[in-house]
Image (cartoon, rainbow, N blue to C red):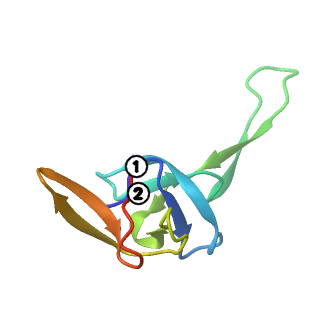
Amino acid sequence: MKIKTGDHVLLLAGKDRAKKGKVLQVFPRHDRVLIEGVNRRVKHTRPKKAGQKGQRIELFVPVHVSNVKLVCPKCGKSTRIGYALQGPKKYRKCRECKGEFE
């Protein structure tokens, strides 16, 4: 998976399309990423005890990795990712401006 925790991404599909956010968590086994402030769901809970009120809990649900695109920190455009070798290290680079990702 080319997307890592801390990357800034652009959402390509869904009700929150064209929103940008930071990746909080990555789930490589399920090919999903959790993005800050995107794909919000509201869960209604029933009261557990007498006299207690029910609640609405906001949850942020993971998005499939095919629906997001990385945003380059150098040029600010959404871009594809390439890899380059620099000695024994492999690093990610922007296909647009050739800038290096951290």
Is 92 positioned to the left or the right of 64 in the image?
A: left
Q: Secondary structure at mark 2?
A: strand
Residue occupying the point 33% across, 66% down: 93
Whether residue 1 is visible:
no
Q: Quadrant of the N terminus?
A: bottom left
Q: Give the residue drawn at x 34%, y 59%.
A: 31
The residue that disc 2 covers is: 32
| Residue tagged 1 | 26
Side of 96 relative to 87 (left or right)? right
Q: Secondary structure at mark 1?
A: strand
Identity of the amino acid at label 2? Arg
The image position of residue 18, as x and y in percent, is 63, 74
Q: Position of residue 12 (x, y in %)?
A: 53, 76
Work out whether mark 2 precedes mark 1 in sequence or the reverse, and give the earlier one: 1
Q: CA distance from mark 2 to mark 1?
A: 6 Å
The image shows residue 56 at horizontal and vertical percentages of 77, 42
Residue at 84 percent across and 24 percent down: it is 52
Q: Which amino acid lies under the numbered mark 1 shown in the image of this protein?
A: Val
Residue at the outermost front position: 87
In the current view of this chain or complex, which residue is farthest to the right? 51
Depth check, front residue: 19 or 88:
88
Mark 2 in CB contact with mark 1 (< 8 angstroms): yes
Residue visible at 62% across and 58% down in the picture: 38
Q: Is residue 32 visible?
A: yes
